[in-house]
């Protein structure tokens, strides 16, 4: 599985959890119970830490890909002779 897919999974699940908890919290006066609060807090911590971890991993991977791509482009440009523009003054 690609890092980008894992990152998107964690991010989407985190956002969905936030919306669901908000909707349930707005409709129920006694939400959350102490057990539910600890369970939701634990789940939220895991999701947020996972999202942050894979965001960093994805940024490192994309940075390395950009560096490799720029080396290839520089190598291709170096093999091309420079364009000469005639002076017409």
Image: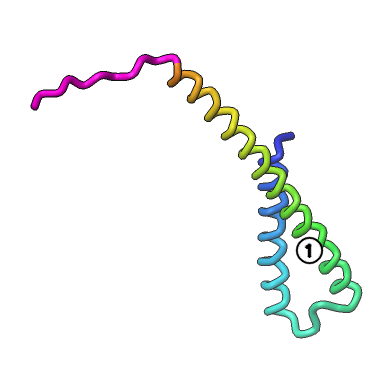
Q: Is residue 29 magenta?
A: no
Question: Tag 1's secondary structure?
Answer: helix
**Helix, strand or loop for the magenta stretch, by majority:** loop
Q: Quadrant of the C terminus?
A: top left
Q: Which residue is mark 1?
A: 44
Residue closest to the far bottom: 29
21 and 42: which is toward the camera: 42
Picture quarter with the N terminus: top right
Q: Is residue 46 above or below residue 86?
A: below
Q: Residue furthest left?
A: 89
Magenta stretch: includes residue 84: yes
Residue at 82% x, 58% y: name it: 46
Q: Position of residue 21 (x, y in %)?
A: 72, 70
In this view, 54 is above or below 79: below
Please determine whether, in this image, residue 23 is positioned above or below residue 84: below
Looking at this view, is 68 or 14 the one in front? 68
Residue 29: % across, % down = 75, 85
Colouring convention used in this rendered image of the protein: rainbow
Q: What's drawn in magenta, residue-wise?
A: 79-89
- Tell me what residue is drawn at x 69 percent, y 66 percent: 18
């Amino acid at each position: 599985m690609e890092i980008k897919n894992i990152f998107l999974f964690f991010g989407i699940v985190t956002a969905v959890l936030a919306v669901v908890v908000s909707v349930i919290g707005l409709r129920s006066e006694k939400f959350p119970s102490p057990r539910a609060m600890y369970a939701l807090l634990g789940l939220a911590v895991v999701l947020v830490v996972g999202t942050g971890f894979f965001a960093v991993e994805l940024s490192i991977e994309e940075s390395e890909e950009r560096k490799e791509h720029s080396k290839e482009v520089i190598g291709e440009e170096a093999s091309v002779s420079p364009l000469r523009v005639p002076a017409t003054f």
